[in-house]
Image (spheres, rainbow, N blue to C red):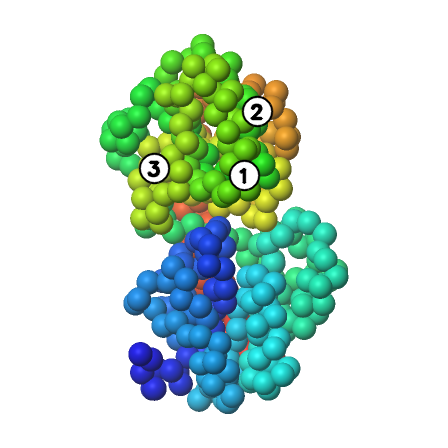
Amino acid sequence: MINKKSFKDIELIIGNSNRNFSGVTSITLQLLKEQSRLKNIAVLGKHYVPETYTTINFFQFLLLTRTKHSSDRPRVFFARRNNEMLQAIIAKYFFRSKIKIIFNSTAQRNHTRFTKWLMSKMDSIISTSDKAASFLDNPPDIIIPHGIDTSRFNPPENKNTAWKELGFPGSFGIGLFGRVRYSKGVDILVDACLDILKENKEATVLICGETQVEDLNYKKMMISKITEAHLEDRIIFLGKKTFEELPFIFKGMSIVVALSRNEGYGLTPFEGMASGAAVLTSEAGAWKELVRDGIDGHVVKTDNVEQTREKLLKMINNFDETERMGQEASKYVNKKFTIEEEARKIIDHINHVQVI
């Protein structure tokens, strides 16, 4: 039950429309803790939101935004998805809600006419990288990279111990995190590792993520290759893991791989870096722009098995250097890409939008 006083005090409404847990959901949840310290917040949609935060339904959203906040400033609706922009547009233009709408754009692809129309109704647009901004018809008002919750993702005291505690064979872990589907390039990692792991007995690959029904044949194809190569105990599909379990798996990884063929932003390499892992990424998402090639790990051409195999083999064979990369990567994330910094910049921009 929402307290009437606290209900009136809400100044920022954050969209949360997806029933399925996704990277966007993860970002929303991780930012909530920090943003709530800076602003009175409600989340429109209760999916995955801890009970400690205020959630509201669409009717309550309309009721809340009939009038301005007690400060006489309009409330702000913060959207990350098309349907969240649409919810806010309906509220503002059909129900006369006293709100300003901000959209956080991460997509690195040409936008549809419908998305462009939705964005044309926004009061402000934030982009997460220069590359994402390049796909907008007009420059964004500000670029704010995503941050990492370093209280959750941080290096273990001892990487070897963290790996052993996970209970898998081999001396160290190579991890890929995300849904098992073609766009994530999971097959690129599998194909690259088939020969590598026959020769190298120290590494074990963990693929951590959900497989949806439409992607089961894709997964079966990879399992068939793995079985034929007798690597069932060296390339392991873990399935979906909880929000709470993920940091412990990241801590055990020495190398985190992200080989998406296309990606909006892509948090998992940065979560890996924060956890003290070197990274191997494609050029998708924000990775080419933000990962320091040769310092934090390596960036390879998108959809390139041969280059992936070459760089991964180099990281395995020069493991001392790979460990140093992981240490440097962790320092880099803590200096440049913390969740606290992202939250502060977003709230500062929201405060600016409220008064213009």
Residue 193 locus on image (x, y percent): 50, 20
Q: Is residue 9 above or below residue 225?
A: below
* Labels 3 and 2: the sequence-earlier one: 3
Q: Which quadrant is the N terminus positioned in?
A: bottom left
Q: Which quadrant is the C terminus positioned in?
A: bottom right
Foreground mark, 1 or 3? 1
Circles 2, 1 touching at the beta carbon (< 8 Å): no
Location of residue 121 (image quadrant): bottom right
* Labels 2 and 1: the sequence-earlier one: 1
Determine the secondary structure under disc 2: helix
Label 2: how many residues lie within 10 Å, few (<14), some (14-19) or many (20+)? many
Determine the secondary structure under disc 3: helix
Q: Which mark is residue 339?
A: none
For disc 2, the marked residue is 308
- Which is more toward the observer, 109 or 219? 219
For disc 1, the marked residue is 215
Q: Is residue 210 above or below residue 281?
A: below
Q: Residue at x 48, y 25 (%)?
A: 223
Q: Which mark is residue 249?
A: 3
Three-letter amino acid code of the residue under disc 2:
Thr
Number of numbered labels in the structure image: 3
Q: Residue at x 53, y 73 (%)?
A: 77
Label 3: how many residues lie within 10 Å, few (<14), some (14-19) or many (20+)? many
Residue 65 locus on image (x, y percent): 50, 84
| Residue 104 visible somewhere in the drawing | no
Foreground mark, 2 or 1? 1
Three-letter amino acid code of the residue under disc 1:
Asp
Residue 213 locus on image (x, y percent): 51, 42
Q: Label 3 vs label 2: CA separation?
A: 22 Å
Three-letter amino acid code of the residue under disc 3:
Ile
